[in-house]
Image (spheres, rainbow, N blue to C red):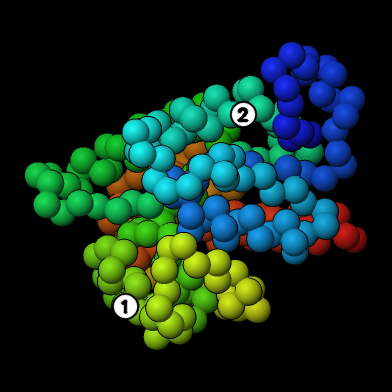
């Protein structure tokens, strides 16, 4: 399952060399924050292999399209060419990106809904999960420390709150060790936030089990919200299942 391969190796050859561990391949929009965070899970897990695609490519992939649809297209290519993914074994491929609305654009909200919808349709066909944060991934960090329903317009709004807990936070800083003991709190706060938005008639299905039901409009209009907890909880459950 999920082993990286050379182009000349056949899928049958690859299957013979499978590990026993489920493999989670994560393709990130950003190449610093999310990459550093998820890479640390390999030091935590002994029964799950977390593979970060293109983790040696830093920055925002300058010159490359990183909108949700193109990120999913990249994930499909990586899944096809670089890994042997078997869902029955627990293998998964996730795309992680931000809603990140540019309110200076005309019709910004609807444009973002349409953009994510294209990614959703494409990802569903290829069984790729979407890890989405509104407005940005740093909201997941913030939920390790506090629960909030306050509208957070952009990264700067989230950073102001995060700075209360992590002094001089920067996207290039690896803060995993400052967060790891608060993971349960982050998951609980995320679930509480999900219930809050659902009480306002938003549709926010589990991104692991019900990925085909992802509702782009609800996601864009649920601020703040992130479903990164679905990904993390899935990995946590795999680890516990394999330990027992």
Query: Is residue 194 in view?
Result: no
Residue drawn at (34%, 71%) of the image = 158
The residues tagged by marks 2 and 1 sit, at their Cα atoms, a distance apart of: 37 Å
Q: Is residue 183 above or below residue 204?
A: below
What percent of the width, then of the height, locates residue 13? Answer: 85, 18
Dot placed on the residue nearer the N-terminal end, 2 or 1: 2
Q: Is residue 69 left or right of residue 31?
A: left
Secondary element at tag 1 = helix
* Category of crowding for the residue at label 2, using alpha-carbon neighbours closer than 10 angstroms: few (below 14), some (14–19), many (at least 20): many
Q: Quadrant of residue 239?
A: bottom right
> Is 242 on the left-hand or right-hand side of 43?
right
Q: Which residue is mark 2?
A: 79
Q: Is residue 163 visible?
A: yes
Q: Which residue is mark 1?
A: 160
User: Of helix, strand and loop, which one carries label 2?
Assistant: helix
Residue 77, above or below 156: above
Q: Is residue 59 above or below residue 77?
A: below
Q: Position of residue 8 (x, y in %)?
A: 74, 14
């Amino acid at each position: 399952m999920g082993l990286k391969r050379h182009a000349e190796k056949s899928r049958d050859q690859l299957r013979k060399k499978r590990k026993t561990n489920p493999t989670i391949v994560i393709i990130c929009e950003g190449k610093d924050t999310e990459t550093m965070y998820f890479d640390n899970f390999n030091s935590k897990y002994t029964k799950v292999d977390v593979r970060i695609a293109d983790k040696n490519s830093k920055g925002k992939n300058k010159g490359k399209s990183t909108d949700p649809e193109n990120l999913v297209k990249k994930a499909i290519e990586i899944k096809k060419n670089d890994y042997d993914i078997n869902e029955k074994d627990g293998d998964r491929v996730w795309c992680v990106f931000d809603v990140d609305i540019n309110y200076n654009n005309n019709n910004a909200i609807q444009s973002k809904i349409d953009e994510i919808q294209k990614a959703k349709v494409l990802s569903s066909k290829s069984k790729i999960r979407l890890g989405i944060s509104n407005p940005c991934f740093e909201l997941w960090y913030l939920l390790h420390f506090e629960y909030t329903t306050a509208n957070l317009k952009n990264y700067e709004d989230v950073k102001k709150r995060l700075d209360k807990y992590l002094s001089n936070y920067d996207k290039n800083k690896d803060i995993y060790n400052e967060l790891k003991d608060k993971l349960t709190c982050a998951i609980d706060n995320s679930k509480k936030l999900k219930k809050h938005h659902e009480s306002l008639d938003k549709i926010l299905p589990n991104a692991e089990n019900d990925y085909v039901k992802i509702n782009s409009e609800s996601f864009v209009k649920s601020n703040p919200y992130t479903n990164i907890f679905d990904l993390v909880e899935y990995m946590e459950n795999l680890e516990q299942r394999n330990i027992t």
